[in-house]
Amino acid sequence: MVPEPSARARSGLEDVVVGDSAITLVAGETGGLAYRGFEIGELARHASFEGVLYLLLEGDPPTTPQLAELTRELASRRVLPIALQRAADALPAELPPLEALRSLVSTMGTRSFGYPPTRAQGYELVAKAPSLLARVVRRRKGAAAVAPDPELGHVANYLYLLQGRRPTERALRALETYFILLADHGMNASTFALRVVLSTQSDLASGAVAALAALKGPLHGGAPSKVSDMLDAVGDPGEAERWIDAALERKERLMGFGHRAYKTEDPRARIFKEVARVAAEPRRFALALEVERAALAALGRRRPEQRLYTNVEFWGALVLEAAGLERDLFTPTFALARTAGWTAHALEQAGANRLIRPDVDYTGPAVGRTWPTGA
Ligand code: ACO
């Protein structure tokens, strides 16, 4: 039985403000999201992932020379040193990619990370994580690793390193938008985990390992592949209503719906739906449209007070499918985008650090029990 929360405790820290941040505004009631004052729609239309990374870390968009400098910096750091190549090749081939990435970021931490975190360490994390992930994925398939292409940007390089060929314009645009929109999201579970670790004066790589561990769970970043599974299980648009009702009858959660912060449609879902409309396979898009319609109708009917709407993972799954990614790469790809936000939060945390150490209301037995003698 789940115990009643004590009067002072807020279950799941809902609505608890844990600090100040100047990075990202999440407007849950109105469905708004902005990085450093730039709405995500504006960024999706005009920025690159590199530009957003710079914005998150520095607070303002880069000038053309600053963007060129950052692009060069990432390109030079994308190449894996022999020690990291060996670490990647030594992992058990059956390790799921997210867990492989978590292990390899941990290995990276023994090299050049210390406290306080620096921008250079952040670039190291952002640049090397896709190379590490792609290496283990190609090895799993028995394919040789590919060297990064200095002509390509960050997101294009990720697809190139994975697939061994330059991506199509359509796949690249879809995934670039994905990286931009997933780059940060306020005090989400993985970022909070990272900030707790950084607050002990531990390093950025250790914080990223904690963040990756938190991201794995389906209540946070582990949902999008399950959205694809759900679409497969529904199979036909005509089956959507019956399938959704049966799932809710079994008390299952519908993946890709509901959000702690948003009490309306997730703004990222709105943009991804339009990306998917162009990039996804038309029959898949039509199926997703019908599943979304049936899910929103059923959730609205059964749980109107919860205000459950489409979240980023639902249409995000279609975008990742359209970019040609396999399902077990969905959450790792989310993580690659989020390394930008994690770095920004690590720098912000260290800039005004105090140990994060909350309190808890004790609800155990009264003190004064006696230990059984002779036991
Ligand atoms: N389908 C069915 N019921 C739901 C859903 C859903 N997707 N989401 C919430 N509910 C129900 C819960 O069962 C709960 O019912 P109860 O009060 O009878 O137990 C009630 O609504 C409140 O749910 P909580 O879990 O308390 O809400 P919370 O704010 O903690 O959860 C969460 C948010 C975890 C995202 C939830 O909506 C969920 O599980 N969604 C499905 C998983 C998912 O899509 N995760 C990705 C989130 S986006 C991201 O992190 C990037």
Image (cartoon, grey):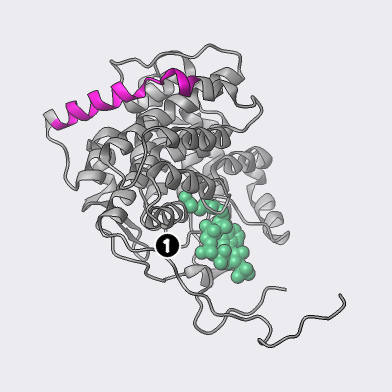
Q: Is residue 82 magenta?
A: yes
Q: Quadrant of the C terminus?
A: bottom right
Instruction: Please state the extent of the stretch shown in magenta in the rendering.
Output: 66-85
Looking at this view, is 45 or 151 the one in front?
Answer: 151
**Residue at figure coordinates x 47%, y 29% from the top left:** 322
- Helix, strand or loop: magenta stretch: helix
Q: Is residue 48 visible?
A: no
**Residue at figure coordinates x 43%, y 37% from the top left:** 109
Looking at this view, is 189 or 39 the one in front?
Answer: 189
Q: Quadrant of the N terminus?
A: bottom right
Q: Quadrant of residue 297?
A: bottom right
Report the number of numbered marks.
1
- Identify residue type, mark 1: Ala
Residue ranking furthest to the right: 374
Residue 348: x and y in percent read 28, 53
Residue 125: x and y in percent read 37, 35
Residue 105: x and y in percent read 47, 35
Residue linked to disc 1: 261
* Secondary structure under the numbered disc 1 in the rendered image: loop
Q: Answer with left or right where residue 42 lies relative to residue 107.
A: left
Ligand 1, image quadrant it occupies:
bottom right
